[in-house]
Image (spheres, grey):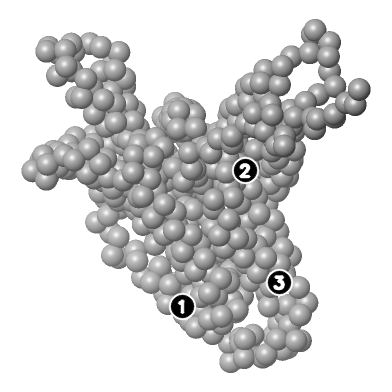
Amino acid sequence: MATIDLPLPRDHTLCRAPSCPPPHRRRDKAARSYTRLNAGTARFLTLLVLLSAVPVASNRPAWWLIWTFVLGAVALTYMLRAQTLMVSKRPFQIRSLRGFIALALLVPLYAIFQSMPWAAHIPAALQALPPNLTEAAIKLPDSLSVMPGASLLGAIRAVGFLLFLILVIEVGTNPARAHKIGLWLMLGILCHGLFGLISLRLLDDYAFWGDKDMYQGMLTGTFVNRNSMASFLGFGLVLGMAFAITRGQEVAQTEPDRGYKTYLTAKRLDILGFWCVTAVLALWILQTQSRMGVVATGLGAFVTFIALRLTYKTSLTRILLQTGGCLLLLLIGLVAFAGAGVVERSLFAWVESGDRISLYTQTWGMILNRPLTGFGYDAFAPAFELYRDDPLVTDRYIDLAHNTYLALWAEQGFVIGSIPIILTGWATLIILRRLRAGSGDTAMNAAALGVIALGASHSLLDFSLEIPTNTYCVLLIIGLAMAPTRERTKTPTPFQGAP
C-alpha cells in the first residue's frame, strides 16, 4: 500500500519524549524571558543615568567613553538575546522610527568626516579662517576640524547616545514599565539632591571629587556646576508633578462612583508624596542659585501642567486659577525661604551680561565664517581662540559657547548642526500625537514635553544638555514617551503552511 508523506507543520520538532514541552509552552517561556530581558535592560539604563552623575556628571572623556563601551556591549547582548528567545523572529520596535535614527546617525558620521585629513580636497571657501590669521601664527591640521582627535572622540560619544536611545525605545514599549522607570528615575534624582544638600549644609560645602574652586555656598552635588545640577533636579521635579497630577485625575474619576470621599486613601497619600517631592526639589533648585535653572524648570513644569490639563479637558477658568495659585505660592513661599541668592543674582543679571553678549557675538562671527562646514565636532574651544577679541581678551579659558544652539552651528555648520534641533521637534510631534491618542503612559508623555521645554529653554543661555548625565536623562524620558506600543507578532498555528 502506498504511503503519502505529508509536509511537516512549521512548529514540528523531532522531540517525542514525554518530557518535551509543547511548542506553545516553549513560546510562552521565551516570551517571559523576553519580558525579563526588557525589565533588566530598563533597570540598567536607569542605573546608568544615576551612576553617570557621580563622577562630575561624567563630563570627562574617560567617563563617557566607559559608558559608551558598556552601552555598546549591552546593546549587542540585547540584540542577540532578543532574537534567540522567540521561535519566530520578533521585530525590533525601533524599526518604526528608522527615519529618526537615520537622521540622528548623520551627526557622528559627519563628525568622523570632519576629523579625516581631506582638507586638500575641499574648496578653500569652505575652510575660511580669520583674515588676520597667518600660517606662521598657527599650524592647523589637514582636516575640517581644527582638533580632529576631539571630533573623533565626540563621534563615539554621539553613537553612545544613539545606542542609549535605541535601547530605551525597545524597553519602553510597555507603558507600565515606562511608568516604573520614571518613578525610579525621579527617586534617584531626589537622592542626588539630598546628597548635594547634605554636602552643602552639613559637610562644609564638600565636593565628592575634590575641593570646590567655584560656586561656593551653592548646591552643586556631584555636578560641580550649579546650572547643570539645576537642570538635573528640574527633570525630577517635572516627573514628580506629572505623577501627582495623573494620580489626582484618577482619584477624581473614581470617587464620585462611591458617593462619598475618603481622604486618607493610598492614592491620596501617593499624591501628597509626589507633591512633597516636587516642592522639595523646587527648594533645592533655588539652593543652586541658578537663575536660568529656575526659569527653565518653571517653564517645563508649566508645559507639563498645561499638557495634562488639556488632556483631561479641564476648563480654561480652572487652569488659570490653578496657574495663578502656583505662581503665588512660588513667589511668596519658596523665594521667601530659599530663593534669596537667586533674587540677588537676578538683580545684577543685566550688569553681568556684557561678557556673555560678547561671547555670543564672537561665536556668531565664527559661524558666519564657516556656515556649512563648521570647525569640528567638540572643537569649539580651540576654534574660538582663533576669533577671540576684545573685551574677552583675558587669561580666562573659554571652552563652551554657553548656548547649545550656537555651539552646534559653530562645530558642524547650519545643516548638520541643526539636526539635533530638528530631531527634538520631531520627537515633540510624536509625543503630542501619543498624548492626544491616549497611547502609552500619560504621565511620562506629559513629563517628556516638560523636559523638552526645560532643556530647550535652558540651552539658550547655558550648556546643561552638553553634560553627558543630563543628555542621558533627557534621552531616557523622551525615549520612553516616544516608544510605540509593542507590536505582537502572530504565532503560526501547528498546520499553518501545510498544503
Q: Tell me the residue at 49%/53% (across/down).
A: 465
> Which marked residue is nearer to the observer: mark 1 or mark 3?
3
Amino acid carrying mark 1 in the image? Trp
The numbered mark, 1 or 2, whose residue comes first in the sequence reads: 2
Residue 352 shown left or right of residue 64 in the figure: left
Q: Which residue is mark 2?
A: 92
Q: Tell me the residue at 48%/38% (across/down).
A: 485
Indicate the position of residue 488 as horizontal and vertical percent values: 55, 35
* Measured Cα–Cα span from mark 1 to mark 2: 42 Å
Name the image quarter holding the N terminus.
top right
Give the farthest residue toward the front: 1
Give the farthest residue toward the top: 18
Amino acid carrying mark 2 in the image? Phe
Q: Tell me the residue at 62%/65% (across/down).
A: 106
Give the farthest residue toward the right: 1
Q: Which residue is mark 1?
A: 364
Task: Report helix, strand or loop for mark 1.
Answer: helix
Q: Tell me the residue at 77%/26% (across/down).
A: 12
Pointer 3 and pointer 2: residues touching (CB < 8 Å)? Answer: no
Residue 328 higher or lower than 246, as above or below: below
The residue closer to the viewer here, 439 or 100, is 439
Q: Which residue is mark 3?
A: 113
Residue 275 shown left or right of residue 67 in the figure: left
Task: Report helix, strand or loop for mark 3.
Answer: helix
The residue closer to the viewer here, 430 or 469, is 430
The numbered mark, 1 or 3, whose residue comes first in the sequence reads: 3
